[in-house]
Amino acid sequence: MRSMRQLITFCLSLLVSVQIVYAEKYDVVVYGGTSSAVTAAVQAKRLGKTVVIVSPDQHLGGLSSGGLGWTDTGNKAVIGGLARDFYHRVWKHYQKKDAWKWQKQNEYGDKGQGTPAIDGKQRTMWIFEPHVAEQVFEDFVREYQIPLFRNEWLDRKQGVKKSGKNITSITTLSGKTFAGRMFIDATYEGDLMATAGVSYHVGREAKSVYGEEWNGVQTGILHHKHHFGPKAVKKKISPYRTPGDASSGLLPRISGANPGKYGSGDDKIQAYCFRMCLTNHEANRVPFPRPAGYDADQYELLLRIYQAGWRETFAKFDPIPNYKTDTNNHGPMSTDNIGFNYDYPEASYERRMEIIKEHETYQKGWLYFIANDPRVPQEVQQKMRQWGLARDEFKDNGNWPHQLYIREARRMVGQFVMTEKELLKKRPTPDSVGMGSYTMDSHNVQRYVTPKGFVQNEGDIGVSTRGPYKIAYGSLVPRKEECGNLLVPVCVSSSHIAFGSIRMEPVFMILGHSAATAAGIALDQNLDVQDVPYSILSEQLLKEGQILETPPEAKYGRNGVDPSKLKGIVIDDSQAKLTGVWETSRSSKKFIGTSYSHESNSRDGKAAARFETKIPKAGRYEVRFAYTPNSNRSSKVKIKLIHASGEADHTINQKKIPPLDGVFISLGEYDFTPDQTAVVEVNNANADGYVIIDAVQWIPVLN
């Protein structure tokens, strides 16, 4: 009898273990702990679906709760749905008196990225402390009673089971299996997507792959101040241990490899860092610790940068409430650990942990070095010693962020690939499920030695999208033959440079919401995700407050003039064919369209713009050129006009206010025919200030 009882006990225990390992079948299984994962799960539950979050992370929210409190909003008018609800909940928190523990609310600067931190009219707040964001995500999960399994890592070797092309279950390294009808990969790495056999890309595509201007290797492009160019460091810096002596070897963290040809593709990815939450409020400040493995030699290059006169260490200590910061990379050698993450996207979990630890050691060492090494300029060191880690943040991780900023890892190659052409509105985007608006932004990828023997960074780029853009539903779903029940709202199908804008946290929340809505429709109608009727999807998303196209007030803002309201034919600077480096701006009080462009006062003769149009009816037209005036503009901007009878050259002084409505200057009247392209060309050759391009207008002259 004893053996029989033992057998029964064993069977019961086995049954219990099987019930634990093989969970019930869910309508939607969300893999990931990011902000996108939470909004996807909430939306699935709102649609009446059974849903589970399987999170490899202990903490919810990814970067949104991991230090990135200085939100990369872009144009907040296109942030809707559950994403806007998140920022509304943050606003509600900061309406409480006890939310302002270290600082009075009226002392807070209310500064954000081109927008106030606190928007009382819209009841949203865009700048916040990490622990506040994490609590909002925890509240979402608690309120909607969403099952959540933390620290559950997908078995990337055999943890995805499929029946035909569709996923039936995923299994984690702990042995837990989660069966489902629909799956959402909301991780920064795209591990579920990759393990399921879905196509993806790692690294930068060549410019030629998608016919883009800003993809691929960016040697010679110096957009921001995160390089060793004249805007950042006045003197050229030797990369060698003994300056000027190549035989002495390279300083640490400089690559001796060829960076590649401009515009070519590679398998490298933009740098990662931790978005640190620092404070100079003594009651909450923890002095920067000396990290294990600290090596002052790793920062020898930083000393040379200081010796060259650079003093912008604190330029990205962006203020968040309670005397804290979201501290980001800034400068030629900052918190970005350039070149030490190339294998992260495909690496094993163990190798990823090593990479994360190396980044932590480097970044903690960077802080400790500046605060303690006697060779650091005294004024910089004294100021750094006033700062430290925030004692009341990341309390279970030594006050250090729990999430490394995975700016880019795998990117799906799905049903539709988003490229810069869609973001710049050069090509229409089908089936919008949300919008982005942030600059196409990539951090540096390489630190290398130039042919003349100096150190330089490569890969940093920032190109305006010239206003909000649509994101295609097809970029969230795999090719139909690869998987019919998976959606990917984070590692979306896009080129490297397009992902540089899409990759912002509000957008990930937006896309998580939309992905779950599509999953719900697919479940209701028993469809593959690729076959979800867009008419039904868009109708549902609009009901839920998602923004699928640019509202007029967001498109042109307070100072933009709608080109469609002007006479004749208007070609905006966003439609011009550009060569060289141009940057967009909205700082003037009046301009045509969503922005205007300038060439950063480079005076190199390499920046040119060509405005082209076809005249529908032969006749005489007045040609007008628009620019925004200022005392720092060039007084001798060269313009060439091509008309039916030949060419005409003009020189205009952009320091002066344009005589026509303060926006346009007339270039004269000319004959044009439909069979010949009408052209206006501008360049910055021999300029003595900024060259501005805004728009060109052709107005028929009535007889």
Image (cartoon, helix red, strand yellow):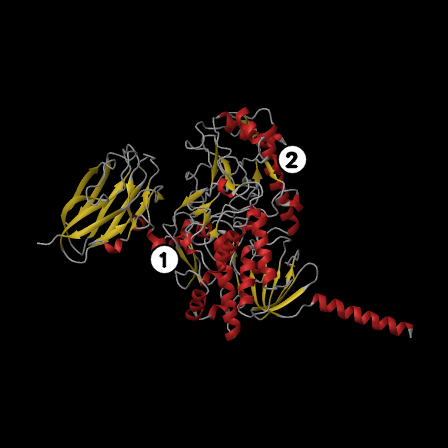
Q: Position of residue 478 (x, y in %)?
A: 50, 63
State whether residue 477 appears in this view.
Answer: no
Above or below, 397 relative to 148: above
Instruction: Tell whether 351 sits left or right of 421.
Output: right
Residue type at the position of mark 1? Pro
State which quadrant residue 363 falls in.
Answer: top right
SS for tag 1?
A: loop
| Furthest residue toward left | 703
SS for tag 2?
A: loop
> What residue is at 61 percent from the left and 41 percent from the top?
360
Residue type at the position of mark 2? Pro
| Furthest residue toward right | 1
Q: Position of residue 389 (x, y in %)?
A: 61, 38
How packed is label 1: few (under 14 Cα within 10 Å), some, or many (20 or more)?
A: few
Q: Position of residue 32 (x, y in %)?
A: 59, 57
Instruction: Tell whether 469 sits left or right of 563.
Output: right
Above or below, 582 relative to 2: above
> What residue is at 87 percent from the left and 73 percent from the top?
5
Residue linked to disc 2: 289
Asked if the residue under mark 2 is in contact with the one under mark 1, i.e. CB atoms within 8 Å, the reply is no
Q: CA distance from mark 1 to mark 2?
A: 48 Å
Q: Nearer the viewer, residue 56 or 576?
A: 56
Instruction: Tell whether 517 sits left or right of 607.
Output: right
Q: Position of residue 351 (x, y in %)?
A: 64, 48
> What residue is at 56 percent from the left and 69 percent from the top?
165
| Furthest residue toward front | 97
Q: Nearer the viewer, residue 589 or 360?
A: 589
Instruction: Mark 1 or mark 2: name the one nearer the start of the chain.
Output: 2
- The quadrant in which the C terminus is found is bottom left
Q: Of circles 1 and 2, which is in front?
A: 1
Residue linked to disc 1: 551
